[in-house]
Image (cartoon, coloured by chain):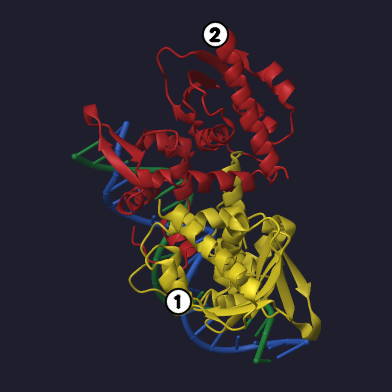
Chain colours: A yellow, B red, C green, D blue
DNA sequence: CGGGATCCGTTACGATACTG
DNA sequence: CAGTATCGTAACGGATCCCG
């Protein structure tokens, strides 16, 4: 929280890195794109970041106006992106597209939760969605519930439950990554790793098409 | 150069950060987008990065395949982006667009050279250029020469001289930043801070339009 | 029990000096 | 010019402890 080690450059890239360039900071923002989160959810998702570091980073993000702390009931506090913090979306997406070019490390540490997928998937869906698409989907990944909504072409993906979804589907993390990176073809992925829980004739195809299109887009950008 | 402190995540954002997330690394890449550079040019541009750190970062980048070391004549070596390293362009552009939202620090350190401007300007020009544009411009900023070329719609901006440019213009750094961030309006910038050295009726307007369009784009993205 | 704060060993960074 | 070597300092990582 001391804040030495800043570049203090006029260059906008330097200015950005002074806000989000510290270790963990971009990963925290990534996870917050899945919606407001508690301290412990972030800590779990980041697989054991030291709590003092998480505190430091959050305070820095709050000081810079990227994150706000909300006091919910029962003394629990929630950390949420501000509008400014939300503008990291395209940045995180480009980071994902670049990282997709590299093979995963030999010993891969699984995150404590899957909030990590939300930004990339939301951004990709946003870029391929039909302009008039509208639905609410419950999207479960390895047991963790997400809510993917399209509201007249505006897509959001958030961690957590929704009531009255139009469609419900379930899948798991590693196959999703594999299919997004061209290691598994999309047909096999959908056939073997996607389970449609409810069947609404028009809507489930719409969701599958959106998701497939998003994953194909990711593959196309990161694989080229 | 030890390389502990990696995230080792399956998440592509984590994989990217394991390559480019260390301090200075993205700034080195930024400067290399202006073309191959010698050790001392990088060191000067990064305003006094410790030489051992620069060595470490370059070696890491080489090991990861983002940078290559070329041995030029007279024993001087040049560091250059590989094709893979060049794929950081959009990432760096998004970083610049995000950083543009923040006010510069009170005491701003000027970079030792202006290679820093190349990525952002090249990317912005690329996005607004006419599909059939073609010219070679000598673009001087505070005495440092750059070469901005459009080859049938493909734009590059590199540090260094060119022979036989179609247009020559000169400007300076701080006004460029100010105009790109909406702090100075474009007309005033062009009128007071841009000097056209040669006059080629069609071409100088083409260049001014391109540059103005690029700076307006930057302002539009980062100022919204 | 969730949400941190404190402490301490380790690693990385920053500055300067030095060398082929 | 292009780095290497050294060393003090700041940041990180892990564990434990504290408080509402």
Give x and y (percent) for residue A119: 59, 63
Label 1 neighbour load within 10 Å: few <14, some 14-19, many 20+: few
Q: Quadrant of residue B44?
A: top left
Q: Residue at x 51, y 36 (%)?
A: B116
- Same subunit, tags 1 and 2: no
Above or below for B185 versus A59:
above
Give x and y (percent) for residue B119: 51, 37
Left or right for A98, reference A125: left
- Residue toward you, A141 or A191: A191
Label 2 element class? loop
Give x and y (percent) for residue A113: 55, 78
Label 1 element class? helix
Label 2 neighbour load within 10 Å: few <14, some 14-19, many 20+: some
- Residue toward you, A214 or B124: A214
Residue A93 visible in the displayed image: yes
- Residue toward you, B27 or A184: A184
Left or right for A124, reference D18: left
Residue B10 visible in the displayed image: no
**In which quadrant is the N terminus of chain A drawn?**
bottom right
Give me the C-alpha separation between circle 1 and circle 2: 64 Å
Which residue is identified by label 2?
B198
Give x and y (percent) for residue B16: 45, 58
Q: Chain of mark 2?
A: B
Q: Quadrant of residue B9?
A: bottom left
Q: Nearer the viewer, mark 1 or mark 2?
A: 1
């Amino acid at each position: 929280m001391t804040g030495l080690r800043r570049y203090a450059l006029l260059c906008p890239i330097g200015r950005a890195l002074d806000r989000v360039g510290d270790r963990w900071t971009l990963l925290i923002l990534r996870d917050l794109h899945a919606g407001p989160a508690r301290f412990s959810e972030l800590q779990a998702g980041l697989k054991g970041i030291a709590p003092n570091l998480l505190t430091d980073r959050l305070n820095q993000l709050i000081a810079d106006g990227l994150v706000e702390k909300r006091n919910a009931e029962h003394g629990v506090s929630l950390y949420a992106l501000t509008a400014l913090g939300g503008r990291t979306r395209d940045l995180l997406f480009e980071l994902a597209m670049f990282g997709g070019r590299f093979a995963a490390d030999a010993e891969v540490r699984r995150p404590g939760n899957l909030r990590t997928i939300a930004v990339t998937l939301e951004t990709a869906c946003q870029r391929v969605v039909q302009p008039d698409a509208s639905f609410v989907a419950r999207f479960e990944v390895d047991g963790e519930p997400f809510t993917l909504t399209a509201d007249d072409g505006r897509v959001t993906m958030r961690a957590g439950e929704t009531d009255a979804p139009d469609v419900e589907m379930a899948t798991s993390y590693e196959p999703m990554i594999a299919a997004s990176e061209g290691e598994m073809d999309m047909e096999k992925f959908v056939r073997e790793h996607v389970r449609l829980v409810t069947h609404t004739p028009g809507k489930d195809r719409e969701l599958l098409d959106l998701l497939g299109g998003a994953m194909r887009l990711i593959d196309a950008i990161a694989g080229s």
